[in-house]
Structures are given as structure tokens and as C-alpha cells.
Amino acid sequence: MNSKKEKLDFYLKEFMQLEKKFHGDPSNSLTLNFNKHKGHLVIAGLIHGNETGSLPAVLKCIKKLLDKDLSYGGKVTFLLGNIEAAQKDLRYIESDLNRSFGESYKGEFSNERKRAIELMPLLKSADVFIDLHQTIMPSLKPFYIFEMNHDSYHWARALGGASTLVTRKKGASFSQVGMCSDEYVRSLNKVGITLELGEQGFSESAEILAFSVLKRALNCMDKVFKSGIPIEKLSRKNSDFEFLTISHREPFDSPKKCLNTGFRNFHKLSKNMIVGADEKQNPLECPRDGYILFPKYPIRNSLGEASLPLPGEIYVIAEPTLIHPLNWLKT
Ligand SMILES: [Zn+2]
């Protein structure tokens, strides 16, 4: 298995074969129920099609559960969000699936919105939902990213796997069009967590990290739902996160605006540092100290213009929070 296409086909075929026997609802999901407690863990991969790095770990986990190599007493569903986009090596086909959830969606009625509508009843039935993603560019470390929420925070800390949580205050919606999958689950007062495993695509590090988090998630589910141990107690066994919050979003408001090459997620930025060039090719200055997240390097034509539609931001800055974000919830 050399090419990423061959790898993808291999893992998708394995998933489809297992799905025939243990199919969940809707399509491209697989449910195993061990019936010893009522907890339901839902794991998502490929919500963005080209973020394939979680796929080997998802299959490893399913096979180990079936072989009783991993013990678990509850219900677990594995869902693959956007297989069609994965096969085309795209983030999405018509619109971003991870902005397509919720009852008050305002975007177009795309294939991805249809998929979100199919997935919403499954997400409603989850007690704990873990959405596995990857970043477009390489990352100096993996990280969790979700709006601050008491239970979701303690679950993420109990799961380990990353020492950074990029978070935001409640109500500060991630996007205006529609909800992310984890945001939708949290809106139902359930646990919803997003983990960014690193740069998109298959890698040994993504597989090892995703598998260790899945294994711990199953273990925590048993402890919480079978033995009645509070998640706070399991969370406090691990050290706390470094908390960052997004303090600046640099708009991608002109096709000529560009970043200097080589930025990876979490490279340190300082105020007034030249990070690229604006639409008139004047230096683009960084307005604050912090860490760069989600730097964008789209394909450009011979005039240096990025292909349309432009992403909302060319990069964002994340800074350490001033107080522990649990305190945000006290007002
Ligand atoms: Zn993603």
C-alpha cells in the first residue's frame, strides 16, 4: 500500500465489510452494543473528507472490540462523515459538513447539509461524541478545540492525547452559517469534543494518537456509566491543559493577500512581525503576540491570486487565556 488512494480504498473497504454485519443508522456508520450499561459513545472520522488520519485507528478499535482484545460494556458507534469527499481528496464537495449541523442552519441545501440531517438523530443519541480532525498544514502539536463546557472539558482532560485546548466563551459561535458537529451535540447538553490530530492525511503519529484516545474513551465510558465514577475524578488524574483562545482573525479579503511560506500551527508570532503581504503587496503585520493557527496556502494563479471562494481567514492568532476558562462559566 503505497499511495494514499490505495490506503484509503483499503480502509474504506474494510469499514464497508464490517458495516454490513454491524450497520448503524444512517449509512456509513457501524454500531457495536455490549449491553452492560446504557452509555453511548459516538466517534466521527472523515467529517472533512481529506482528514483521513483517524481511519486506521477507527478500524483497529473496531477489530479489537470484536476480538475482545479491548473490553467495553456499552454502545459505541463509529461514523464516517464524508466518504465521497474523501475519495476525491477534498475537504467537502459542496459545502463544509462541519458547518452544516443544527436546526437553524442558514446555508444552501447541499449534499453536506443532507448528510448532517441524516447524522443528527445519531448525534442526539450520543452521551459522548468525539470528532477526529486534522489541520491543513503541519502542527507542532495535537490539540483539542471546542467551546468551554464543564463536562466536555473534563472528558477531554480525562482522554489525554493533547496538552493544549483551544477554547472560547459560550455563545461565541465558531461559524455563522451552521453548527459544527461537536457544537450541535453540546447544544443538546451532551459531551462534544473535537481533537485535531496533526497534519491531514495518513500518518503513524495520527494513528497512534487517535487509537490511544479511543481506547481511553471506551475505558472512561465504562467507569462513568457502569461504575458511576464522576468524570471530574478521572480528569484530575491528568495534568491540566494549556488554554488558548483566538484573539485575532486575519480576514482573507483579497485574492492577492498571502502569508510568508513555512508557517505551521503553533509557530510563535510577535506584534509587528511581518507575516506576509496584503493585496497591494505591502507588508502584512501581525497585530498581536501569540501563536499562529490555521495558516492558509491556497493554490494561486500566475498573478499570485488565490482561487475563489477564499476561506474566511488567512490565519488566526491564539493567545493564552488570562484566567482558567472554567471561571468563564461562573457568570
Ligand atoms: Zn477538519
Image (cartoon, rainbow, N blue to C red):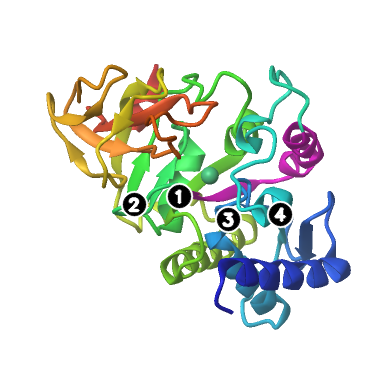
Query: Mark 4 and mark 2: span between their CA atoms?
Result: 25 Å
Q: Nearer the viewer, mark 4 or mark 2?
A: 2
Does residue 256 appear in the picture of this structure? yes
Q: Nearer the viewer, mark 3 or mark 1?
A: 1
Query: Mark 3 and mark 1: span between their CA atoms?
Result: 24 Å
Sequence-wise, the earlier of marks 3 and 1 is 1
Query: Mark 2 and mark 3: span between their CA atoms?
Result: 32 Å
Sequence-wise, the earlier of marks 2 and 3 is 2
Query: Where does the magenta region start and end?
Result: 111-134
Q: Are marks 3 and 1 in contact (CB under 8 Å)?
A: no
Q: On the image, numbered disc 2 is attached to which residue?
A: 139
On the image, the x and y values in percent for residue 183 come to: 58, 32
Q: Is residue 209 left or right of residue 272?
A: right
Mark 3 is surrounded, within 10 Å at the Cα level, by few (under 14), some (14 to 19) or many (20 or more) other residues, namely some
Q: On the image, numbered disc 1 is attached to which residue?
A: 196
On the image, the x and y values in percent for residue 276 come to: 24, 30
Query: Mark 1 and mark 4: span between their CA atoms?
Result: 17 Å
Give above or below for 195 relative to 7: above
Residue drawn 70% across the image and 54% down it: 80
Query: Mark 2 and mark 1: span between their CA atoms?
Result: 9 Å
Q: Quadrant of residue 113?
A: top right
Task: In this rendered view, identify the residue nearer to me: 182 or 252.
Answer: 252
Give above or below for 268 relative to 198: above
Residue 62: mark in rendering:
none
Q: On the image, numbered disc 4 is attached to which residue?
A: 79
Task: In this rendered view, identify the residue nearer to me: 231 or 277.
Answer: 277
The kind of residue tagged 1 is Glu
Q: On the image, numbered disc 3 is attached to which residue?
A: 224
Q: Secondary structure at mark 1?
A: strand
The answer to whether the residue bearing label 1 lies less than 8 angstroms from the nearest atom of ligand 1 is yes
